[in-house]
Image (tube, rainbow, N blue to C red):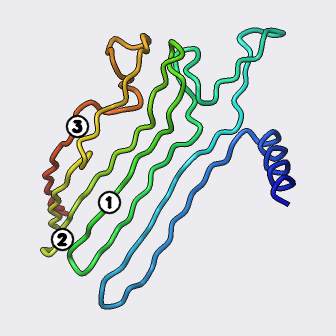
Amino acid sequence: MTGDWRRSWRAAAAAWPGVDVSFAGRFPTGDYGRMTLTLDGTYVTKYDYQREEGGQYIHNVGVYQDAAPIFRWQHNAAANWGLGAWNVVVANLYRSGYVDQTPPHTVASYSIFDLTVGWSGVKNLVLQVGVHNIFDTDPPKSNQTTTFQRGYDPRFTDPRGRTWLFRGSYKFL
């Protein structure tokens, strides 16, 4: 049975180049507030292309090729809890690792978490405080030479580390 399932999965993966996933769920919690969970992700099983007609096929999933990698899996996920004027959001950004521009180096997966607390207890006023990259995760090392930054790929990661956020807004009209 297990072997049949694997063959079926491989056949489906060969037919479909990938799957986009989107989920949003609200969960009423009564006296404890409200909870919303969201996930938006992409799983790529196949990404093949030719540079010229009749040329060799390039298999790019999980490999840095022609100026960029194709991530096998990437997602944005969040949990949002609210009670009265208070709101708390925990978010996660994830990108799977890949073979770097100059093999055999491999770029590690990248995952950061953000936390935001908001308050809207006064009409038209919203105050927020938060932390981007809570765990101060460094971008994974990369030997790419496509951009002028060296040591990491700035198109897919953030070198700033842990960053604090303070925001206030007031709607006049």
Question: Mark 3 packing: few (<14 Cα in 10 Å), some, or many (20+)?
Answer: some
* Mark found first going from the N terminus, 2 or 1: 1
Instruction: Work out how far the residue at label 3 is from the one at label 1, CA to CA, in angstroms.
Output: 17 Å
**Mark linked to residue 90:** 1
Question: Mark 2 packing: few (<14 Cα in 10 Å), some, or many (20+)?
Answer: some
Tag nearer the camera, 3 or 2: 3
The residue beneath circle 3 is 161
The residue beneath circle 2 is 120
* Mark found first going from the N terminus, 3 or 2: 2
Q: Residue at x 42, y 10 (%)?
A: 145
Q: Is residue 104 left or right of residue 34?
A: right
* Mark found first going from the N terminus, 3 or 1: 1
**Depicted 38 relative to depicted 85: above or below:** above
Kind of residue indicated by mark 1:
Val
Q: Are marks 2 and 1 in contact (CB under 8 Å)?
A: no
Kind of residue indicated by mark 2:
Ser
**Depicted 36 relative to depicted 34: above or below:** above
